[in-house]
Image (spheres, grey):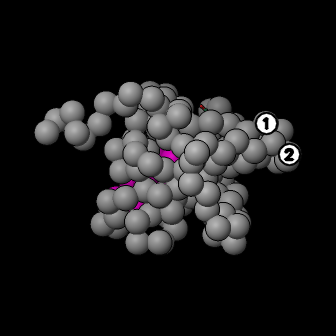
């Protein structure tokens, strides 16, 4: 059974992910995404998706948030909340699952949207048998 975050902390992360989506730069897909990370220090970092006219260079919200946290010196991801302004919740893409696993092999992953639908799971469920840092030891 995956860990659970305390409800007030969860609410803060959810609010941060919703706010982050407002900065989404997604002129091509028109699909806004916001993410909030709970880092090892207990600080919250946020990110949005940032698209590019060269489509392959689009960056997802989760990776924007994790790279921002890593650049601030964080080395642990405890939880990731993804928000999309849609009727159904969106689970992180495969690339983001790999990036979450790097710093957060035990991370809680929560997806929220504009309905009551909500997904709450753990990265080892979303990315079983992951390739990770220990494979390079
Ligand atoms: N996107 C994310 O930001 N996170 C995901 O987990 C799935 C997809 C973004 C990438 C792109 O800007 C848009 O959503 C459509 O794929």
Give the prevailing secondary structure in the magenta stretch.
Answer: helix
Residue 69 within the magenta-colored segment of the rendering: yes
Image coords of residue 113 (percent x, y):
76, 46
Q: Nearer the viewer, residue 54 or 41?
A: 41
Question: Measured along the vertical axis of the image, is residue 50 above or below residue 5?
Answer: above
Q: Is residue 27 visible?
A: no
Q: Quadrant of the N terminus?
A: top right
Left or right placement of residue 41 versus residue 22 in this view: left
Of mark 2 and mark 1, the one earlier in the sequence is 1
Residue located beneath label 1 in the image: 88
Q: Check disc 2 and report its element: helix, strand or loop.
A: loop
> What's drawn in magenta, residue-wise?
62-70
Disc 1 C-beta below 8 A from ligand 1: no
Using the rendered view, name the quadrant where residue 76 is placed: bottom left
What residue appears at the point 34 percent right and 64 percent down from the top-left corner? 74
Residue 111 within the magenta-colored segment of the rendering: no
Left or right placement of residue 56 versus residue 117 in this view: left
Disc 2 C-beta below 8 A from ligand 1: no
What residue appears at the point 57 percent right and 48 percent down from the top-left corner? 2
Q: Check disc 1 and report its element: helix, strand or loop.
A: loop
């Amino acid at each position: 059974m995956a860990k659970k975050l305390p409800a007030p902390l969860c609410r803060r992360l959810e609010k941060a992910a919703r706010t982050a989506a407002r900065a989404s730069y997604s002129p091509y897909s028109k699909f806004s995404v916001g993410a909030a990370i709970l880092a090892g220090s207990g600080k919250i970092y946020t990110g949005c998706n940032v698209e590019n006219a060269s489509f392959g260079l689009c960056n997802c919200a989760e990776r924007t948030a994790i790279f921002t946290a890593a650049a601030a010196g964080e080395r642990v991801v405890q939880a990731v909340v993804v928000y999309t302004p849609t009727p159904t919740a969106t689970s992180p893409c495969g690339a983001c699952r790999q990036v979450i696993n790097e710093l957060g092999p035990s991370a809680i992953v929560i997806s929220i949207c504009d309905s009551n639908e909500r997904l709450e799971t753990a990265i080892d469920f979303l990315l079983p048998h992951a390739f990770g840092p220990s494979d390079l030891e």
